Amino acid sequence: MYGGWKRAVVTGGAGFIGSHVCERLLAGGSEVHCVDNLVTGSRANIAHLSGNRRFCFVETDVTDPGSIEAAPDRVDLVLDLACPASPVDYLRLPIETLEAGSNGTRTALELARRDRARFLLASTSEVYGDPLEHPQSEGYWGNVNPVGPRSVYDESKRYAEALVSAYRRTYGTDTSIVRIFNTYGPRMRSDDGRAVPTFIRQALAGDPLTVAGDGSQTRSLTYVDDTVDGILSLAASGRPGPVNIGGSDETTVLELAERIIGLTGSASTIAFVERPEDDPGKRRPDTATAHRLLGWQPRVDCAEGLKRTVEWFARSLTP
């Protein structure tokens, strides 16, 4: 079981991925200190953990340097997952997104530095931008528009990676970077704007599924359980990264919409809408590093993962 950490701090712990990370750490015996300002996270995501005496939730903004004072003494692990991650959120909250990657990451790094704790930054495949290399390996520097609307997220994470690397070189902080690709699963918000929850919500309601452009752009989906395995395996490894964690089954957005219509048994049709600016044309990780260094590979295939996710949404959206 991963690293045997006594006490972990998870920033963004009430978010989609963060709540699953908190759950897994508790199952492994860790005491978990969950920090979230609930701007995009939700108390509902962690409600089932509130009765656990090893779980503590603090509503605070990690971009405030004073929030470090709310952390417990002698932390073993700091997982920095605090940042709006869907286009709907980071386009609505551009300054807050940039602050999460700068001030927020520095606050979390200072906590790790204070206690000589292991630190992990949850970065993203968005650092590769609209890639000219396919699949994308960790050595690829990316093709990012630094002044486009998506840059608030892309550059927030690129800056955060540079900051984490600087702390490692300057202070010897035990840091690591994971680059997460297109994760989906239970606890995603139905209105967060990403393809999987949007298509499922529309299909269950019998509404047309809104496919951007002609739908030929590709994504490589990763079920949340596999993403959490990758995050915690890297944290336990002592490796600095960056390491890609993502699925190997590349699918077009149109194919994804059609699969979800089939899974839900919906009578929905496809409606093509304008494609967002700087929307990546292709996205698939080279995960050879994760397999070689961590022994990691996805275990939940897309068919099973989508089935589980549809079932969860069907329950959660029922009045």
Image (tube, grey):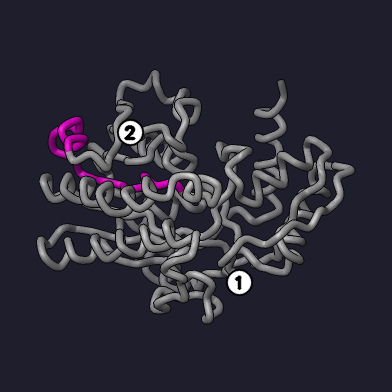
What crowding class fits label 1: few (fewer than 14 Cα within 10 Å), some (14-19), or many (20 or more)? Answer: many
Q: Earlier in the sequence, mark 2 or mark 1?
A: 2
Residue drawn 62% across the image and 39% down it = 191
Q: Quadrant of the C terminus?
A: top right
- Is residue 116 toward the left or the right of residue 149 in the image? left
Instruction: Name the residue type under label 2.
Output: Cys
Q: Secondary structure at mark 2?
A: strand
Q: Which residue is the site of mark 1?
A: 282
Q: Is residue 138 visible?
A: yes
Q: Which residue is the site of mark 2?
A: 34
Location of residue 280 with respect to 225 vertically, above or below: below
- Is residue 250 toward the left or the right of residue 167 in the image? right
Q: Extreme bottom residue here?
A: 133
Residue in front for this viewpoint, 148 or 223? 148
Q: Is residue 32 visible?
A: no
Report x, y in % for residue 214.
Answer: 76, 66
User: Which region is colored magenta?
Assistant: 66-84
